[in-house]
Image (cartoon, rainbow, N blue to C red):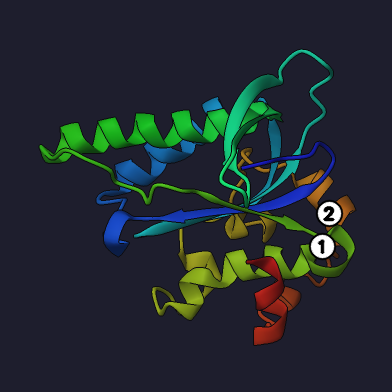
Amino acid sequence: MRFTEGNLYHIYNRGNNKQPVYFTPANYIYFLKQVRHFLLPHCDMLCYCLMPNHFHFLVFIKPTGDIRYRQTDVKETTKSGQTITISTERHPLAAAIGYLLSSYTQSINKQNNTSGSVFQQKTKAKGINQFLYGETCFHYIHQNPLKAGMVTKMEDWSYSSFTDYAGFRNGTLCNQQLACELLNLNKETFYEDSYKVIMDEAVNNIF
């Protein structure tokens, strides 16, 4: 994953072989605590949704200055068969996501007396055009439980940030002020806007 400061990203992953990743309410809560610990030093969370077998985040990458990047070497093979090494700078958020999933996996394996990967190997991070698709991505993430038939109202799903923005809960994981500024969210019409149908062609631009 490559991140650029000052940009929006849709980050998502799901269970290995589409298996569940959260088994109890405590699992969801623990995962969100780990998100706060590992990710928030490097990004602002704009919205999130945890589903039984996957998760979605919309984040804004914080400036890092010049001290947190770590140089990594990536080996690539040219068309002629020659192997070359390319040095790249890796944003600390990429490593933090790895720590988050590894920590959570260890906890779940201990809880369930299992072993191996809980999540798919590669977490996806899609850069989002703030002005064209930022609001679409935001509402899509919140609509996940509704579209999956988990609830009939989005506020009935406890493991997303919708209830915070809609005023049903005082959550602090998301930077709501920043989200409203970046995505031009209207607090007065937020609830109605959140339930608007998102066309498939718009969804294609956030993955």
Please rate how many residues cluster around mark 1, counting C-alpha atoms within 10 Å: few if below 14, some from 14 to 19, many from 20: few
Q: What element carries label 1?
A: loop
Q: Identify the residue at image location x=61%, y=26%.
A: 73
- Viewport quadrant of the C terminus: bottom right
Q: Where is residue 6 in the image (x, y as percent from the top left)?
A: 85, 40
Q: Give the residue type at disc 2.
A: Cys
Q: What residue occupies the far front of the structure in this picture?
A: 80
Q: Identify the residue at image location x=36%, y=29%.
A: 103
Q: Position of residue 171 (x, y in %)?
A: 60, 43
Between the C-alphas of marks 1 and 2, the distance is 8 Å
Of residues 201 and 60, the one nearer the viewer is: 201
Q: Name the residue under label 1.
A: 187
Q: Give the residue type at disc 1.
A: Lys
Q: Identify the residue at image location x=37%, y=51%.
A: 120
Q: Which of marks 1 and 2 is in front?
A: 2
Q: Position of residue 157 (x, y in %)?
A: 46, 63
Residue 39 visible here: no
| Residue 169 left/right relative to 8 | left
- Circle nearer the N terminus (1, 2): 2
Q: Please, is residue 21 above or below residue 32 in the view? A: below
Tag 1–tag 2 contact (CB < 8 Å) = yes
Q: What residue occupies the far top of the structure in this picture?
A: 67
Res 109 quadrant in image = top left
Q: Name the residue under label 2.
A: 180
Q: Identify the residue at image location x=46%, y=28%.
A: 99
- Viewport quadrant of the N terminus: top right
